[in-house]
Amino acid sequence: MFYLLLTILANVAIFMAFRSYTKLGINTFPAIITNYGVCVITGILYTGFSTVSAETDVSAPWFYMASILGVVFVSTFYLMARTTQLRGVSVATVASKMSLAIPVVFSLFILKIGTNNLDTWNYLGIALAFVAIIMVSKKKQVDSFKKQPLTLKYIALPLAVFLLGGVIDTTLNYTNHHYVNESTEAVFPIFIFGFAFIIGISVALIRGIKFRQKDILGGIYLGIPNYFSIYLQLKALSAFDNNGAILYPSLNIGIIIASTLMAILLFKEKLSRINTIGVVLAIIVIMLLSHQEILKAL
């Protein structure tokens, strides 16, 4: 639970960083690219250059997985941004959070981790997690979004965000289970962000994207929690014996509750009735998913 809580806090810090971009006039794409470079620097400083050098093995399976994830990270971000612009924040948020279905199904039916320890209450919690996410993410849409027909062209962007988000978490789960050990947990994310930075900076150079001082600053304070969000997620997976069926619903619900509370306190956001019910349901989901640990503690 300790690493799960730290992962939630790191993700909330990312959420707060993104929320500040609009207010500060920071261009998202150059800030994101800068963020990937900062993630690499943060990881090396935290792990130690000698450790990174000693544990780096370009022939190791986790190294190839890192290169794949680097590509997916950049692609997911771009599609997430386009979905937000063309389909609205609510659609993008739901598509991103609903992607937890992919690692949950993968963990239950492919890896088959911890299935013997799951009971009816756990399965109920997993099912209700999707309902809670939709309810908390429900926002009033602009009329132009409401009038859009539900065609393949309309759902292509959110569907891509859903699939790629699920690929990221599933790949992290699989790689952590099979290839990453305690000595490479901190090194693996460095190469994920390293590959993402190389791809991102290449795109920026080709497209002639300019990096302003405040864009770089935005990337710096995003990059530090971003590195730890992946590193701590790997630690949390290990702590949960790589049981993604429990970890990912708990993680997403925790992020939603914490981010919602921060948005209320710092940005004075107001919740609708359905949002409030969703938050209450999310708390119930956490209790259902962790009821075995709660009973042990009592």
Image (cartoon, grey):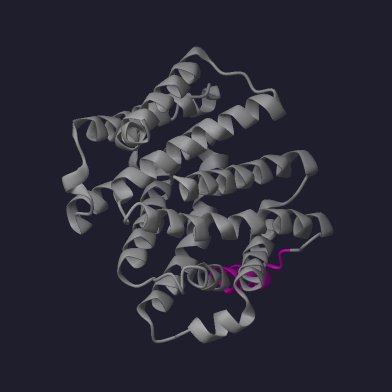
- Residue depicted at 66% across the width and 41% down the height: 16
Quick check: 270 left or right of 292? right
In the picture, the quarter occupied by the N terminus is top left
When the figure is inspected, residue 64 is found, relative to residue 37, above or below; the finding is: below
- Can I make out residue 100 in this image? no
Residue extending farthest to the front is 298
Q: Is residue 96 magenta?
A: no
Q: Is residue 207 magenta?
A: yes
User: Hey, which quadrant is residue 33 in on the image?
Assistant: bottom right
Question: Total of numbered circles in the picture?
Answer: 0
- Residue depicted at 51% across the width and 67% down the height: 189
Residue extending farthest to the right is 213
Residue 186 horizontal/vertical position (percent): 52, 68
When the figure is inspected, residue 152 is found, relative to residue 37, above or below; the finding is: above
When the figure is inspected, residue 69 is found, relative to residue 257, above or below; the finding is: below
Q: What secondary structure prevails in the magenta region?
A: helix
Residue 25 horizontal/vertical position (percent): 78, 45
Q: Nearer the viewer, residue 198 or 172?
A: 172
- Can I make out residue 248 in this image? yes
Residue 239 horizontal/vertical position (percent): 39, 54
- Residue depicted at 44% across the width and 20% down the height: 280
- Residue depicted at 36% across the width and 62% down the height: 171
Which residues are drawn in magenta? Answer: 196-209
